[in-house]
Amino acid sequence: MSQPKQQTHSFSALLAGFASELTFAAVPAAVIDRAQDLFVDWVGSALAGKGGRPVEIIANFCRSMGPADGPCEILIERRGTSALFAAMVNGAASHYVEQDDVHSGSVLHPGAVVFPAALAISQEIGSSGHDFLTACVAGYEVGIRVGEYLGRSHYKVFHTTGTAGTIAAAAATGRLLKLSPDQMLDAFGSAGTQAAGLWEFLRDAADSKPLHVAKAAGSGLTSAYLAKSGFTGAKRILEGPQGMAKGMSTDANPDKLVDGLGSRWALAETSFKIHASCRHTHPAADALLKAMRENDLSAGDIAEVTALVHQGAIDVLSAVVSPANVHQAKFSMGTTLGLIAVYGQAGLSEFEHGFRNQEVAEFQQCVRMALDAEVDQAYPVRWIGKVRLRTRDGRIIEVRVDAPRGDPVNALSRSEIEDKFRRLAAFSQATDTSETNTLLSRLWQVDRARQVSLLIPRNPSRRRSPNGPKPQA
Amino acid sequence: MSQPKQQTHSFSALLAGFASELTFAAVPAAVIDRAQDLFVDWVGSALAGKGGRPVEIIANFCRSMGPADGPCEILIERRGTSALFAAMVNGAASHYVEQDDVHSGSVLHPGAVVFPAALAISQEIGSSGHDFLTACVAGYEVGIRVGEYLGRSHYKVFHTTGTAGTIAAAAATGRLLKLSPDQMLDAFGSAGTQAAGLWEFLRDAADSKPLHVAKAAGSGLTSAYLAKSGFTGAKRILEGPQGMAKGMSTDANPDKLVDGLGSRWALAETSFKIHASCRHTHPAADALLKAMRENDLSAGDIAEVTALVHQGAIDVLSAVVSPANVHQAKFSMGTTLGLIAVYGQAGLSEFEHGFRNQEVAEFQQCVRMALDAEVDQAYPVRWIGKVRLRTRDGRIIEVRVDAPRGDPVNALSRSEIEDKFRRLAAFSQATDTSETNTLLSRLWQVDRARQVSLLIPRNPSRRRSPNGPKPQA
């Protein structure tokens, strides 16, 4: 039954109204700063995806279907295109090497869906830096709440970044297009009815993950554009009797949709990733690092490792037994802990060159996961790290970390964000040192931009082939 | 766990292999003929969408994001574009006025998702008419089985045409791109992980339906292109523990996926729509027509109508109480039966001009739906029509039809298909009489085409503005 008057009070409508009406002045300065940090980190993640085989396939498809040029920058190529394809390619690129940000409570990768859509629109319509950052905050606030709303049951089957992420991208794009509250609600309706992404791909080490993000960013952007032109959507796509929660969740909690709107800035709860692996491995990885340092252990001293984890880790990582490639290895608790043990870190290079190392493989064999009541109880708001080791000389050592590195309580400084950025750019050779310096300088000043413009310097003498250097695995 | 060898025997793999390896010679001539009939009918449906407000919004978006020109024809405009956007716009156009084909058992609109994707690719790569029709058969066979597999529980919340339709489009496109069985399985994996579409939009008379089809056709086509380039997908996206059935159904039956592959030609079970309304209204509409003819009744003689229906009708149509616009009226049992009673038919013009007619509105008030055990038991394989009338002079009349008009047992002749086509083209003024004649002639000969080429004559002196005539409601 159509009841338009009553639905202006629905949770979907409240969330849409918040996104539509968010002003730069209403966002605390510290949150704006954090948004800028996350933006810098996201650009680094996007650069790191250059040359990745699945990323390049998506990029080639977009090139063949799109215009020859356009105002929206493809960060891994030296050309522009229309907003839809820039969002798709940049999104895909940023969600390939497993270095993009993650929000623990919603199990969402907000940056990978919000920034590509927002950047594309901003470059197309010439948004100010203030509008750009405000819109990105709106995207994070919406996406995180939708992810928390859809809950743990959703995440068992669906890739929340692909589903909730579609609405996050619609919110950010919609704010930049200055949608009214009603139009923003229409954008949510269109986005939610395109929301998709299933975890089944991971069992087969298939390429779908960057595709999920490309589609979420692209579909969210599409939804906002359509709404601007008067295209209507369901008014209760999230909570309605034939909506997202009904179709894709069994524990959706509507209070989460509007939790602390305007006072709780969920963006500031977002974590930076250090280890180049699925975030579910990070708490145990950090606990293992601590255990080895505190007890002066090397990999060879350890006979057995039990990672004491939350259910989400089991849901996602159990599918991976023997990683078939680098990407799937990033979803292996055993491989991640093996790299930590053998190399002291599990970064891009360690995964690239070390995931099949003999010693790493042997270490992987002695790793198992077990559900831990305390860790699971705290999940997903807190991701406690715990490991139990049995050493070869018979000691049992149990170590705990309250929060993995990169969580807000254990945050990265701007200098550490820059170091990570440079490693990512160098890894894929997307930009050389000089370009990286210029780019970083522009990124740190985006808040002051009168109009967000091209980020990467286009020096014709430095033009690279669109296909970049050697492809990664 | 990754088990590539065993999964070559999965139902998903068998279905993908069937689609990949289908040859023209293997398809009975009568099925090829029916495919051609459905193609003609689909083109008519696409033309009828010209000028529809939501269709034009999607078309404008695609124009702004796509290349200035391309080899793939947009049937409602006089220009070409890339395959992705041609598929999206033609798909959307064909699923707006509720005249496109429907397969009863799967509750799927196969034509609206298969033909736009297949036509676009065929025009891009210059496929033969034989390949085009074979690929469309593959699309129908796959899509219908996936729809039947996902079942009634899926359809309660999800729009099967948007979800299963994505895989149908991938199958047709993949066959034209000559994907190997493994590549076709990858295409299914990519398609299934993008499958989306929720019924919630209908409660608010929102515009989403053509968007669902645009996305299904576009995402299916995308999946096939990606697979051709080596992009991998889940090998059991349909039946796996984190796949479509797990996420979006509670009564999925795997046997349906491979039911009679190669012997049962589900395409030939597809129905043509006569009344310009949701197919769930058609059985009752035909029963009412029969009742009124047999008993020489006019609208004013009838005091009350009970449409004795299956559950699917209640699931979809109950949401509409007081139709807000023409499109929503097509999902109103009461309005549809009112038009039948007052005008003797419920076609495009009757809906456009009569849905708010006083007499129709009064008739609508006396219509109710009730679940009928016999009708529901036969559903969805058979859609039995039953109505019970109470006349003003106190008679109770119950009438039944075994199958609504347009079902294979009650099929349209080629002459009737042409008549319908002309009505659709004239309704939107997409083509004038001369163009319609040329177009029909080309369509009826597509099986003989060496290369599928442009369908609508491009006479520069007849060039219309891309925005067509006055927009519909």
Image (cartoon, coloured by chain):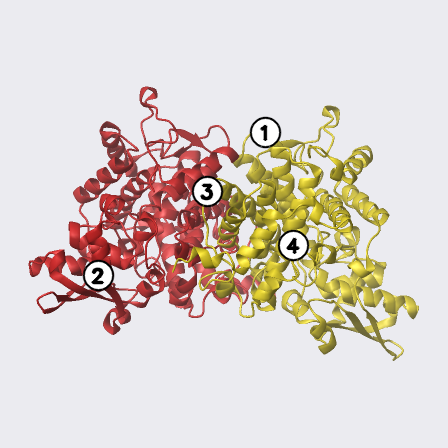
Chain colours: A red, B yellow
Disc 2 marks a residue whose amino acid type is Ala
Q: In the picture provided, is B370 more to the left or to the right than A40?
A: right
Tell me, yes or no, if residue B381 can be seen here. Answer: yes
Q: Is residue B112 above or below residue A145?
A: above
Of residue B29 and residue B351, the one placed in the foreground of this image is: B29
Q: Position of residue A397 (x, y in %)?
A: 12, 68
Viewer-side label of 2, 4: 4
Of residue A22 and residue B395, the one placed in the foreground of this image is: B395
- Answer few, some or many: residues within 10 Å of disc 3's Cα (few below 14, many 20 plus, some between 14 and 19): some
Marks 3/2 in contact by CB < 8 Å: the verdict is no
Marks 2/4 in contact by CB < 8 Å: the verdict is no
Q: Residue B394 sits in which quadrant?
A: bottom right
Disc 1 marks a residue whose amino acid type is Asp
Residue A423 badge: none
- Answer few, some or many: residues within 10 Å of disc 4's Cα (few below 14, many 20 plus, some between 14 and 19): many
Q: CA distance from mark 1 to mark 2?
A: 53 Å
Q: CA distance from mark 2 to mark 4?
A: 48 Å
Residue B141 badge: 4
Q: In the picture provided, is A349 more to the left or to the right than A314?
A: left
Chain under label 3? B
Marks 1, 4 in one chain: yes
Of residue A126 and residue A356, the one placed in the foreground of this image is: A356
Residue at mark 2: A284
**N-terminal label among 3 and 4:** 4
Q: Is residue A410 above or below residue A460?
A: below
Residue at mark 3: B230
Q: In the picture provided, is A451 more to the left or to the right than B269?
A: left
Q: CA distance from mark 3 to mark 2?
A: 34 Å
Residue at mark 1: B69
Disc 3 marks a residue whose amino acid type is Gly
